[in-house]
Amino acid sequence: LVMPLSSVFRAIGLIQRGAGAYLRIDEALALPQEPAQEPGPALPGTPPATPRSPAHALELTDIRFAYVPDRPVLRGATFTVPHHGLVALVGRSGAGKSTLFSLIARLYDPDAGSIRFDGRPATALTRRQCRAGIALVDQNTHVLEGTLRENITYAVPDATDDDILRVVRLTRLEHVVRRLPGGLDGRLGDQGGTLSAGERQRVALARALLARPRLLLLDEHTSHLDAVNETALTRTLSDVTRDCAVLVIAHRLSTVRHADRIVVLEDGRTVASGRHDRLLATSAAYRELAATHVLHGRVPENGER
Ligand code: ATP
């Protein structure tokens, strides 16, 4: 009696697992399909096909978006990120900064307005094509139990030592390589416990840059950075623009002061843009952000990049 009964229970378990898998497959099949043929010859991750390179890596025009009907979050966001430019997006909590990142990464599509990558409308590209040239480093910087090498290369496992050392230098992590017993193959400890907050953030950046994106989206978030790490981040960002365009949700004075352009978002609208000193002189909205906790940190000293 026991043997047949245990066979029946095993069979019931298998049927339940199969039913679960069937539901998941069904959900996946219900997702909207991407066209099987990738349209258009150009990927954002590859150089533009036309000999004359379009002026902007990213161009947003009058973007409007609501998660819930009749509750608009973005009500007219317009700005550009030039090739090799560093553009800082600033605004109060809830202004719509992260939502803009989600639209640029095509997690959602705008209700109105247009997004262009290298001059090409996002709607003419598949989501995969749009994302191919974008690296997103957000507030959730995951550092895994494992080595520095594993943490940097897990999206590009066949990266060479030269590739890895290039991003280590770019993100100013050489001292971590020197400090770790085993160098690149040294272990970082549980959740990167041997690293400071700034070093963890730069490991996430190194990982993103290894894929050679055309556009880096960085949310620098509000966690405290000491002076050394703050300077390292500022220098990293200006070095990174040699490789790609950078759009950063900025919370630090040191970042906005070095940005080629600052874009001020208020209640889902872009209300001002320009460099730090000019905005201080011309934009009340920016002055208010600079005077409150929204932008904080130390102001770099004269001559410090
Ligand atoms: P913070 O600086 O605090 O991160 P933010 O400027 O990035 O803020 P968003 O996170 O883009 O602002 O949020 C803008 C508005 O959209 C907020 O009112 C928020 O509650 C709302 N919102 C964000 N995500 C969703 C979502 N998935 N569904 C519904 N509403 C959302």
Image (spheres, rainbow, N blue to C red):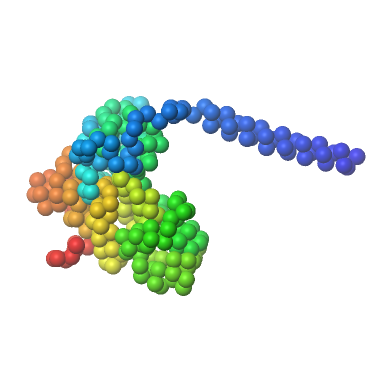
Please report the residue visible at 25 percent of the width from the left and 57 percent of the height from the top: 239
- Location of residue 103 in the rendering, given as x and y in whole percent from the top left corner: 34, 36
Rendered-image quadrant of the C terminus: bottom left
Q: Nearer the viewer, residue 24 or 125?
A: 125
Left or right position of 6 against 156: right
Question: From where the camera sits, is residue 198 visible?
Answer: no
In the image, farthest residue toward the left? 281
Question: From where the camera sits, is residue 174 visible?
Answer: yes
Q: Is residue 190 above or below residue 11?
A: below
- Location of residue 225 in the rendering, given as x and y in whole percent from the top left corner: 31, 62
Q: Nearer the viewer, residue 161 or 68?
A: 161
Q: How many marks?
A: 0
In the image, farthest residue toward the right? 1
Please report the residue visible at 21 percent of the width from the left and 48 percent of the height from the top: 85
Q: Nearer the viewer, residue 128 or 280?
A: 128
Left or right position of 302 against 50: left
- Location of residue 44 in the rendering, given as x and y in whole percent from the top left corner: 32, 39
Query: Image quarter for residue 29?
Result: top right
Left or right position of 253 against 101: left
In the image, farthest residue toward the front? 51
Q: Is residue 30 above or below residue 281?
A: above
Query: Image quarter for residue 296?
Result: bottom left
- Location of residue 174 in the rendering, given as x and y in whole percent from the top left corner: 35, 67
Left or right position of 52 against 8: left
Rendered-image quadrant of the N terminus: top right
Query: Image quarter for residue 132?
Result: top left
Please report the residue visible at 35 percent of the width from the left and 59 percent of the height from the top: 167
Please report the residue visible at 40 percent of the width from the left and 68 percent of the height from the top: 177
